Amino acid sequence: MIDQEKIRTAVKLMLEGIGEDPSREGLRETPDRVARMYTEIFQGYDCNPKPHLNTQFSTPHNGLVMEKDISFYSMCEHHMLPFFGCIHIAYIPNGRVLGLSKLARIVEVFARRLQIQENLGYDIAQAIMRGLSPRGVMVVIRAQHMCMSMRGIKKDAAETVTVANLGCFQEDKELTNSCMRELLSAR
């Protein structure tokens, strides 16, 4: 559970630490605003992906299922700055499929936590493997990181692409390459 009082105290100290006056007009409500915002953007800590994996349907379909361009926002655990972009999910059913909106809900559970992009994709893939037992799952993430854009190296056009493969996507390179071409193709 998120402790808003601790966040308010920390924000006030941070404002003082950068030489600001937390009691000035424009900043008086900032600690409370940040506490409310953090409650929203870090709500993934209070969520479990399991309920979203319960909406399954039987199917004889055993071909590729893809959901492309699921937008997301997350926070880097290294600098506590946002990273954002699109997540593409592909899986090969094993007699069951998920409701399509459930894939986006699973993304939200994991994106709304402090983390790194590589773990975000793996966590999503693992949750789908555990909850649905498909033959395989692939999660491709394309993201921009504010820690690369607004500080440090300052490369605002840099895009990071990560891939998490489980099951048949680890074993069948032809399937993986074919799926990657489709997932990364322009709309």
Image (tube, rainbow, N blue to C red):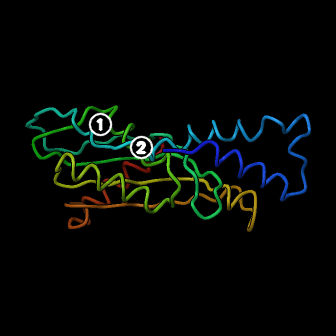
Residue 40 percent coordinates (x, y): 56, 37
Looking at the picture, tell me which residue is in the foreground, 60 or 185.
60
Tell me the element at label 1.
Answer: helix
The quadrant holding residue 152 is: bottom right
Residue placed under numbered mark 2 in the picture: 109
Quadrant in which residue 38 is drawn: top right
The part of the image, by quadrant, that contains residue 65 is top left
Q: Is residue 47 above or below residue 79?
A: above
Q: Earlier in the sequence, mark 2 or mark 1?
A: 1
Cβ–Cβ under 8 Å for marks 2 and 1: yes
Q: Residues within 10 Å of mark 1 (few under 14, many from 20)?
A: some
Which residue type does callout 1 highlight? His
- x and y percentages locating residue 104 in the rendered image: 39, 38
At 63% from the left and 36% from the top, the residue drawn is 36
Q: Crowding at label 2, few (<14), some or many (≥20) Cα neighbours within 10 Å?
A: many
Question: Which numbered tag is attached to residue 108?
Answer: none
* Residue hosting label 1: 52
Q: Which amino acid does label 2 sit on?
A: Val
Residue drawn at point x = 17 percent, y = 45 percent:
93
Q: How far apart are marks 2 and 1 (CA)?
A: 10 Å
